[in-house]
Image: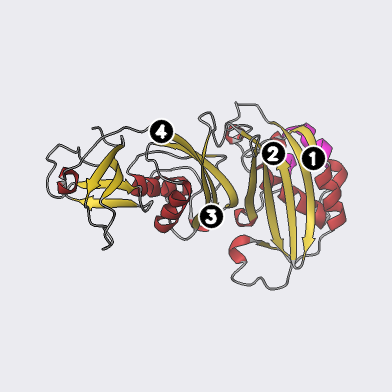
């Protein structure tokens, strides 16, 4: 049996790994490790899933697979959808990068530890270093027949505390976290008090300076609808995403909503669109802040859009204030 291909093992009178006695006949799904009939040595590692208790177990040594009462049956793969929240402060963004700690890399490693399968989860978008998520979505295929609630629990036990799986569900085979996305919502949070509490400093841009909020609100409204957002993109706009990667030069996006919300000591920019270019939200925020400071007029926003030049827009706001809030799909 090849690595990663599951089969069902039925053990008779097998003692529970946690010290209890299981029923006389219990089914386990073999997930990865040595073959049921191959002598792979006394230290071979085997992962298997118990149907009775819904847990994934790791065994050291092949003798556990040589009990009497063994029967085999294969299982098909399933497509999974995870909804994740994470603190992006200590990560070099979402995407796997050599020698760097990333959210995608941590999730990949956690899936390998839990299921024994090597999969690279695909995210709805690639958040940058320092950017947070309240509702990032990832998709991947697994052969292990793990119940939905158990996969979420198992992943949260092995992931670092700064990444949490909010839900894990099986979805249709054609689902893809990036390609199936219809819209995304981001928030940018600015702390307006004189002294930013240390427990909030990682998640806000502290800016107590006076701002013309009404002018910023009018400026934000001017980017609603369909526009070419090249002026608000980073120097590599093809890193943006509509359903994932934009083709070079494809910088037109549709924003459904763009507005500011005032909360106690917080000023929050909320934007929802069918896709966003690299740094687009942070560049919009930086430009609107220039309007709030009086360095730009809100009536200049259409001209900045038409110019299709990054030099015409404002600076890039710091990553720590940005959150990916939600990703929308047709089946939601």
Q: Is residue 211 left or right of residue 315?
A: right
Residue at position x 12%, y 45% in the image: 41
Q: Which of marks 3 and 2 is nearer the N terminus?
A: 3
Which of label 4 and label 2 is nearer to you? 4
Q: Is mark 4 on a helix, strand or loop?
A: loop
Residue linked to disc 1: 223
Q: How far apart are marks 3 and 4 (CA)?
A: 31 Å
Q: Which of marks 1 and 2 is nearer the N terminus?
A: 1
Q: What element carries label 2?
A: helix
Residue linked to disc 4: 77
Residue linked to disc 2: 310
Task: Give, as a single range, the part of the protein colored magenta.
Answer: 301-314
Q: Distance between the residues labelled 4 and 2?
A: 45 Å
Quarter the C terminus occupies: top right
- Residue 114 rendering spot, x and y as whole percentages: 36, 49
Q: How far apart are marks 1 and 3 (CA)?
A: 27 Å
Which of label 4 and label 1 is nearer to you? 4
Residue linked to disc 3: 88
Residues at badges 4 and 1 in contact (C-beta under 8 Å)? Answer: no
**Which image quadrant for residue 184?**
top right
Residue at position x 43%, y 52% in the image: 155
Which of label 1 and label 2 is nearer to you? 1
321 drawn magenta:
no
Which of label 3 and label 4 is nearer to you? 4
């Amino acid at each position: 049996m090849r690595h990663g291909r599951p089969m069902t093992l039925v053990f008779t009178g097998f003692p529970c790994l946690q010290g209890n006695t299981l029923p006389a006949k219990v089914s386990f799904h073999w997930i990865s490790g040595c073959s049921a009939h191959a002598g792979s040595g006394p230290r071979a590692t085997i992962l298997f899933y118990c149907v009775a208790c819904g847990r994934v177990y790791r065994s050291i040594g092949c003798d556990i697979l040589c009990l009497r009462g063994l029967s085999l049956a294969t299982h098909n793969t399933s497509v999974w959808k995870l909804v994740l929240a994470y603190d992006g402060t200590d990560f070099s963004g979402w995407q796997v990068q050599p020698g760097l700690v990333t959210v995608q890399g941590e999730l990949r490693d956690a899936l390998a530890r839990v299921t024994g399968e090597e999969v690279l989860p695909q995210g709805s978008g690639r958040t940058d270093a320092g950017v947070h998520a309240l509702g990032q979505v990832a998709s991947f295929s697994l052969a292990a027949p793990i119940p939905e609630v158990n996969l979420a629990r198992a992943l949260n036990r092995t992931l670092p505390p700064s990444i949490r799986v909010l839900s894990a569900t099986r979805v249709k085979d054609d689902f893809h976290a990036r390609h199936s996305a219809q819209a995304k919502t981001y928030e940018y949070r600015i702390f307006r008090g004189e002294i930013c509490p240390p427990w909030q400093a990682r998640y806000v841009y502290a800016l107590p300076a006076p701002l013309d909020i009404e002018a910023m609100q009018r400026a934000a409204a001017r980017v609603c609808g369909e526009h070419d957002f090249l002026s608000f993109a980073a120097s590599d706009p093809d890193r943006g995403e509509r359903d994932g990667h934009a083709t070079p030069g494809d910088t037109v996006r549709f924003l459904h909503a763009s507005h500011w919300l005032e909360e106690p000591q917080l000023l929050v920019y909320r934007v929802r669109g069918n896709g966003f270019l690299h740094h687009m939200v942070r560049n919009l925020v930086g430009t609107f802040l220039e309007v709030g400071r009086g360095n730009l007029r809100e009536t200049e926003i259409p001209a900045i859009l038409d110019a299709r030049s990054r030099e015409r827009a404002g600076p890039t706001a710091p990553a720590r204030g940005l959150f990916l809030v939600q990703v929308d799909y047709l089946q939601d």
